[in-house]
Amino acid sequence: MPELHCPVCAKETLVIEEAVYDGFTRIGERMKCAVCGHIFETPEAASPSKPKIPALFSEDDLPTPVQLFNEGENRTICRYCKNYLDHTFKQWCGLHEKEVEATDTCDQFEPKPEPKEPPEG
């Protein structure tokens, strides 16, 4: 329900959207004020005007995007290694047989194979 200023009761109000029927056939909708029941002639008359937002900031005020890693640099961490096992209670390296963190690195990194797409059918 949109909110707007009713010209009849001069109050900020909600607009009620009612279905209009001809017998049992729905032929349209009408909009009316929730306070006084004034029926708006057209949906455009009931549509609220969008508030104008002042332009306080320009493109120069936007922060510069932060890039933590170079291209592909974060792809050599344990999370992307084929020996990494992520379990509910711990993260495990199957190669070194020890507990690790997802962001750890080692010299024996082996990338996970690309996931295979399921066959169509």
Image (spheres, grey):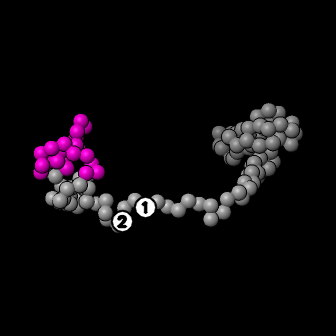
Q: In which quadrant of the rendered image does the N terminus lie?
A: top right
Q: Mark 2 is on which residue type?
A: Asn
Q: Which mark is residue 33?
A: none
**Callout 2–callout 1 Cβ contact below 8 Å:** yes
Q: Position of residue 60 (x, y in %)?
A: 62, 65
User: Is 7 one of the magenta-colored residues?
Assistant: no
Is residue 44 toward the left or the right of residue 94 in the image? Answer: right
Q: Position of residue 81 (x, y in %)?
A: 21, 55
Q: Residue at 86% x, 38% y: name it.
A: 10
Which of the 4 image quadrants contains residue 110?
bottom left
Q: Position of residue 4 (x, y in %)?
A: 77, 43
Which of 96/112 is in front? 96
Q: Residues within 10 Å of mark 1 (few under 14, many from 20)?
A: few
Q: Residue at 26% x, 56% y: name it.
A: 77
User: Is 94 one of the magenta-colored residues?
Assistant: yes
Is residue 45 toward the left or the right of residue 100 in the image? Answer: right
Which of the 4 image quadrants contains residue 40?
top right
Query: Circle 1 is placed at which residue position?
Result: 67
Q: Residue at 22% x, 43% y: name it.
A: 91
Tell me the magenta residue range.
84-104
Query: Circle 2 is placed at which residue position?
Result: 70
Measured along the vertical axis of the image, is residue 54 above or below residue 14? below
Which of 61/21 is in front? 61
Callout 1 secondary element: loop
Which of 77/13 is in front? 77
Q: Position of residue 95 (x, y in %)?
A: 12, 51
Residue found farthest to the bottom: 71
